Amino acid sequence: MYRFAYYIFKPMESTRQKKVARSIQKELGSFFQRQGSGIFPGKMITVTVVRISPDLSQAKVYLSIFPSGNSREILKSISEKGKTIRHELGNNLRNQLRIIPELSFFLDDSLDYVQNIEDLLKS
């Protein structure tokens, strides 16, 4: 229940926050599309949500990893490569953003949660 309450009662984001979050989401999505298959063969990594702080210095990036087996290890590996990913993001967004935010990666397990609910309803 708490998981959905966060999405319903989240604080208002400014237009600037939304634009920056969307551009980060697009660039990270294309990064994982290009580099993800080489780093993690057989896995599909999707950037589902990017939440950015009001001062645009911190970004929480929620990733969905399919298939979800050993996704915690993959998320840990991605977090360890966070500096490299931020550098690539800076190269792509240097003309749009003055400061590239620090990236924090989290696992978006909402699809697993939905699948679990469906399995419970079927039985």
Image: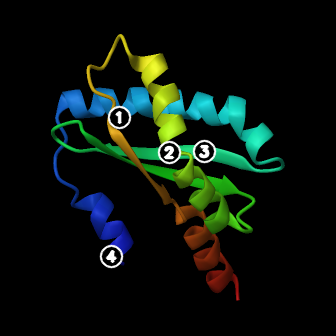
- Determine whether 21 is above or below 68 in the image: above
Q: Say which of marks 1 and 2 sits in front.
A: 2
Q: Say which of marks 4 and 2 sits in front.
A: 2
The Cα atoms of the two marked residues, 4 and 3, are separated by 23 Å
Residue 46 bears which disc, if any?
Answer: 3
Tag 2, which secondary structure? helix
In this figure, which residue is indicated by the disc labeled 4? Answer: 2
At label 1, the amino acid type is Ala
In this figure, which residue is indicated by the disc labeled 2? Answer: 82
Decide if residue 11 is on the left or right side of residue 105: left
Q: Earlier in the sequence, mark 1 or mark 2?
A: 1
| Residue under the image location 16 percent in, 46 percent down | 12
On the image, the x and y values in percent for residue 107 come to 52, 61
Tag 3 and tag 1, C-beta contact below 8 Å: no
| Residue under the image location 57 percent in, 69 percent down | 114
Q: Residues within 10 Å of mark 2 (few under 14, many from 20)?
A: some
The Cα atoms of the two marked residues, 4 and 2, are separated by 28 Å
